[in-house]
Image (tube, rainbow, N blue to C red):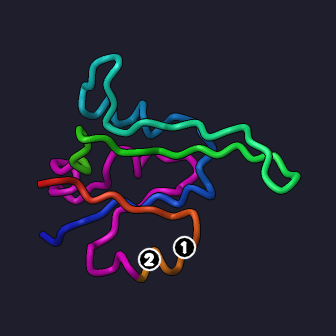
Amino acid sequence: MKEKALVIDYKYCTGCHTCEVACKNEKDIPVGEWGIHLEDMGPIQLGGKWHWDYHPIPTALCDLCAERVSSGEEPSCVKHCLAKCMQLVDLDDLPRVLRELGDGASCYIPAE
């Protein structure tokens, strides 16, 4: 199987925490620990406009739901993301996908 990366387009994250809940339920992660954790960035005033952004950040507990992916499913966070701002991509496609998404997109590749 090809190596994969999680791509998150932060421009569209609504801060709903569904990725956190889906991950905790999938991996049975205890209270106070996270597989993916939503960081609340704001409110902050920049250039006369107010900004309030959300950033889902995978932690060291994230393995991109290796068991689900090996059986042809998406990672739990990707499947349940209400804003559809997360996607699992092949590493070969990563530069193209990030270029297409532009500013505000990031990727996560779990440590082996």
**In this picture, is 5 found above or below 2?**
above
Residue 108 in picture, x, y percent from top left: 33, 57
Q: Which residue is mark 1?
A: 101
Q: Check disc 1 and give the amino acid type.
A: Leu
Q: Are marks 2 and 1 in contact (CB under 8 Å)?
A: yes
State the residue at coordinates (70%, 43%).
52
As for residue 81 lying within the magenta part, the answer is yes
Q: Bounds of the magenta span?
A: 66-95
Q: Check disc 2 and give the amino acid type.
A: Val
**In this picture, is 88 found above or below 37?**
below
Residue 97: mark:
2
Residue 26 in picture, x, y percent from top left: 28, 34
Residue 68 in picture, x, y percent from top left: 21, 49
Residue 111: mark:
none
Q: Looking at the figure, which quarter contains the N terminus?
A: bottom left
- Packing grade of label 1 (10 A; few <14, some 14-19, many >=20) is some
Q: Secondary structure at mark 1?
A: helix
Name of the residue lying farthest toward the right: 48
Residue 7 in picture, x, y percent from top left: 41, 62
- Packing grade of label 2 (10 A; few <14, some 14-19, many >=20) is some
For this view, does 109 lie left or right of residue 82?
left
State the residue at coordinates (11%, 54%).
112
